[in-house]
Image (cartoon, rainbow, N blue to C red):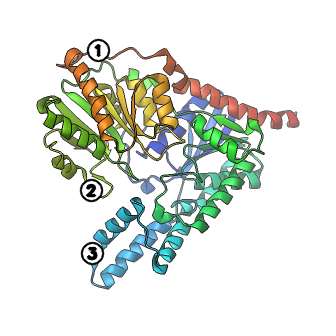
Amino acid sequence: MRTVLIISYNWPPDASVGAVRPLKISKQLILHGWKPVILTVKERYYEKLNNEGGGAEDIVLCRTRCLPSPIDIYVSAKSALFKLCGRANKFKESTLRWTSETQSGVSSPTFTNRMKRLVLSLLYTPDEFQGWLPYAIMQSVRAVRAHSISCVVSTGPPFTAHLVGLAIKKLCGTMWVADFRDPWRQNEQRPSMFQSSFSDRMHRGLEAVVLRNADRVVCVSPAMTESYQKSYPDLPDKKWVTLTNGFDEEEFKQLGTVSRYAKFTISYMGSFEYSRTPESLMRAMGELLKEGTLEKDRLTIRFIGKCRYAVGKSVMEMAAQYGLEGIVEIKDLLPRSEALREMLSAHVLLLLATRQVLQVPGKAYEYIAAGGRILAETEPKGATADLIHRLGVGAVVPPGDHESIKRVLKAWYADYIVRDMGGGCELPPRSAALKEYEWTQLGIQYARVLEECVEPVIKQIA
């Protein structure tokens, strides 16, 4: 078997969504004659752990140390300064206010704030995982030599992984595939407090060096691939490959028979990080209740994951504001199998993809495979909207448009009353159009990409 080094900061038991794609790719590559060696960090660096694990026995795992994040050092120093000044109780309030201002686009023109933003932006270039770079490069060089590795795949974010891939390309001469789960320079979700004109130039320069040196660049949506091709028209067409995220049919089969909830249930899996918020949904639901369109004892809204706060507000207080007491439920992170079961049980799956014009959230494909209706709050002209419309699996509403949400939910609730009330309804058969998004199909394509990379080297050696 040929050996491939996969550089991924996220890997099980990391509970973040970033661990899913590299794991699925690795398992599929094994089936197509590749032996994966995974370079990642030690488990203690992950914020949340998935108790189900989910790794594969046939994969060689190399875990490294990581220096503290510059951002964490900054926050710790700021906290210590507040304590030294006798203002420890004000630190959290100050941090939240600062975050809220930057998220809403408010920016002070003072010299102090400009310098603060410049320093933070440099600490966040290419991201907050800079401390992984030296350990990852050293361990990668060892792995290439120890395992006779012929190809390297780096997957990001974090984009530090691509800098590791670049270093190994230069040091060891291996073929290299740069896998982009999100755009780098055009990442709209990067907090504004971590941006400056100087750091933007650095991001552009680093991205260009990575794209020009990688033998293949894999993007997760046609929109992202097209955007990069337009930005780098001088690069050859064969460099660009679109390979989306997907769903694992076997995972769904292992769940057995699952029925919908008895109540009309809207579920959301994930987090309310960046600018994501359920407020438009709650406002719409609150107004529909007041109008008598919805019945409170037949409704449930379930938020599962890192969902207790959104843009600095308590989600439960938000629910009370719109008269949704007793309807909204919040559960912390679930094991993966339970999260998939939740997707199957809900009538509506909420997808928040605001400020993500070029990419599709990874969970969208599992939402689609689950067979429920998807309410996607996203830009009408974007990768997520294109996918939802093309497959006909739900409705797309512009960010913040609660009136559109009302119209959609009114129709779907009426359909629930006619067909599904009482629960136990059978799930609809999966559309044949989803076949291309199964990881078995995506694995075949990914293996082909690696084979095309190493083929010229093999011919040269022969």
Placement of the C terminus among the 4 image quadrants: top right
Whether the residues at callouts 3 and 1 have beta carbons within 8 Å, the answer is: no
Q: Position of residue 55 (x, y in %)?
A: 48, 38
Q: Determine which quarter of the picture holds residue 89.
A: bottom left
Measure the alpha-carbon separation of dots 3 and 1. 53 Å
Q: Amino acid at mark 1?
A: Glu
Residue named by callout 3 = 90
Mark 3: few, some, or many residues within 10 Å (few <14, many ≥20)?
few
> Which of pointers 3 and 2 lies earlier in the amino acid sequence?
3
From this view, report whether residue 334 is shown above or below residue 100: above
Measure the alpha-carbon separation of dots 2 and 1. 37 Å
> Which of pointers 2 and 1 lies earlier in the amino acid sequence?
2
Q: Secondary structure at mark 1?
A: loop
Residue named by callout 1 = 426
Q: Viewer-proximal residue, 218 or 395? A: 395
Q: Position of residue 323 (x, y in %)?
A: 14, 44
Q: Determine which quarter of the picture holds residue 234.
A: top right
Measure the alpha-carbon separation of dots 3 and 2. 18 Å
* Residue at image point 62% right, 34% down: 242
Q: Viewer-proximal residue, 104 or 460? A: 104
> Which of pointers 3 and 1 lies earlier in the amino acid sequence?
3
Q: Determine which quarter of the picture holds residue 92.
A: bottom left
Q: Viewer-proximal residue, 74 or 203? A: 203
Q: In the visual, does 30 lie left or right of 234?
A: left
Q: Amino acid at mark 3?
A: Lys
Residue 313 numbered mark, or none: 2
Q: Secondary structure at mark 2?
A: strand
Residue 321 numbered mark, or none: none
